[in-house]
DNA sequence: CGCGGCTTTGATGTTCATCAAGTAAAGTGG
DNA sequence: CCACTTTACTTGATGAACATCAAAGCCGCG
């Protein structure tokens, strides 16, 4: 009864994530999750997770965009991945580590839902279907990450830029015309090249009429050519 | 009863892997797993898994060493990872994909145990403790892989060679004197450089008295210097 | 207004891949 | 067992790709 009431008063019931990961929860489990969850908004630029902090919550992105980054011992920053709502790298490590081995920063206004990690762990123990969907999701995220790296590592600089622009257009914004959520420097940190060369190749693509650039705004006018560069690089 | 008998007659009971992943299974589960498992030996060079084949089994390495590799569309081979018994990359993707997205080849004589994937999936559903340990193991493997890539990508060629030699010595053979299980070309495929440059840097390190080389045999004589090169690269 | 961060372009030098050529080692068929 | 072929290994020379350095314009913000 109590559970019933809690559930109906809970916005989680209409959350997109419910179908992805939580559809196998019982009403009581769902309600318990709901009651202790904590939702928070982060505006662009805010730090969501700091490298080294203890892992106490299972986080997921309701919406928004984040960068998962890490600083090496000489202070150089690297972006491991751009995290989208349903494809969140943090998922992979949160059940094994005690402390975060990376930071997470909002690239756009982002809503994050956090649940006590032990509550989720006990749900894994008690609900096999939930455990299965979590394992499947983890595998899918791994695959994405592994393929992303595999594809990127073999390419030259022009190929990388082409690849990343197509990735933004197709996988993140579903639109050939979009605003970059990151600076030129951050693109370099993500695909492993210097800021100067990111800019140089942007300019090259503009000169060759493959893209239009207006500050952060990118409009891909020749997708075919861009894809060819990405494939051949 | 029947289960009991099956269990005591099964060699799995003394398998190292039992403690890692399967210690939370009930006797009946363990016995069921045992009865349908299939163990096979592969000698050096044999193909264990072929890219594109359907995933029907959950595989783990009992002992030996494998390379996980993938061929890009122009026929160029890349090694994603070297798989050790308890740290097997395949673990990450086997529950999400329908077909293998990579090949696995034995680098040394290797024993592989294979269990029907659906049996394992149903164990995940029915045994929460098992699901938990699997999720933890998956997370640990992810972490290793992500860190491996993070470390490697920032380094120059000398740093990469130093890093990989230390990895072999410390994480695989626990000995500064070891036989390389791979060719010079394969090292290049693993850390992203040409065969010629792998050899060149080997020769350089030999000239600088950091390592001794005798064919496949490597003896690290100046670990500190090698670590410095790995760190600074 | 001025400062700092982001962006842009050009000049220069280093790192690395490619090409070439030769030796050693390992497998293959007679 | 030996000629033969193939594959792995090695070194040098060259050029291309990329990082670094330098300088200047732009923009937002205190």
Image: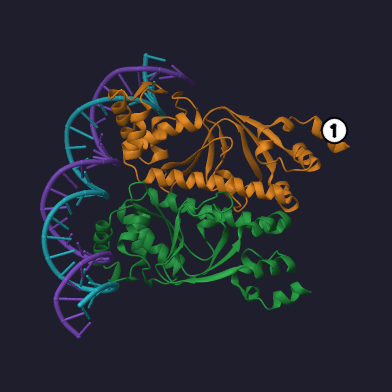
Chain colours: A orange, B green, C cyan, D purple
- Specify whether B29 is left or right of A173: right
At 62% from the left and 54% from the top, the residue drawn is B135
Q: Quadrant of the C terminus of chain A?
A: top left
Chain ID, mark 1: A
Residue A168 position within the rendered picture, expressed as x and y whole percent measured from the top left: 46, 31
At 64% from the left and 57% from the top, the residue drawn is B118
Q: Is residue A119 visible?
A: yes
B54 versus A149 height, above or below:
below
B2 versus B131 height, above or below:
below
Q: Is residue A53 visible?
A: no
- Specify whether B106 is left or right of C12: right
Residue B195 position within the rendered picture, expressed as x and y whole percent measured from the top left: 27, 58
At 66% from the left and 36% from the top, the residue drawn is A17
Of residue B146 and residue C12, the one placed in the foreground of this image is: B146
- Specify whether A217 is left or right of A30: left
Q: Quadrant of the N terminus of chain A?
A: top right
Residue A51 position within the rendered picture, expressed as x and y whole percent measured from the top left: 54, 45
Which corner quadrant of the image does residue A215 belong to? top left
Q: Which residue is mark 1?
A: A5
Residue B186 position within the rendered picture, expressed as x and y whole percent measured from the top left: 34, 60
């Amino acid at each position: 009864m109590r559970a019933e009431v809690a559930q109906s008063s809970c916005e989680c019931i209409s959350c997109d994530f419910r179908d992805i990961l939580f559809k196998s929860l019982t009403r009581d489990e769902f309600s318990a999750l709901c009651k202790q969850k904590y939702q928070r908004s982060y505006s662009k630029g805010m730090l969501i997770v700091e490298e080294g902090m203890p892992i106490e919550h299972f986080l997921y992105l309701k919406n928004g965009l984040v960068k998962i980054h890490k600083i090496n011992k000489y202070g150089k920053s690297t972006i491991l991945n751009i995290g989208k709502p349903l494809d969140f790298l943090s998922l992979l490590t949160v059940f094994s580590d005690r402390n975060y081995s990376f930071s997470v920063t909002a690239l756009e206004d982002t809503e994050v839902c956090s649940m006590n990690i032990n509550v989720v762990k006990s749900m894994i123990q008690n609900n096999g279907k939930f455990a299965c969907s979590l394992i499947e999701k983890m595998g899918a995220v791994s695959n994405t990450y592994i393929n992303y790296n595999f594809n990127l590592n073999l390419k030259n600089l022009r190929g990388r830029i082409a690849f990343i622009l197509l990735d933004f257009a197709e996988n993140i914004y579903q639109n050939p015309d979009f605003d970059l959520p990151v600076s030129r420097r951050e693109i370099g940190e993500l695909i492993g090249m210097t800021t100067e060369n990111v800019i140089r190749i942007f300019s090259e693509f503009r000169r060759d009429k493959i893209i239009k650039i207006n500050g952060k705004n990118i409009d891909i006018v020749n997708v075919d050519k861009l894809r060819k560069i990405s494939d051949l690089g």
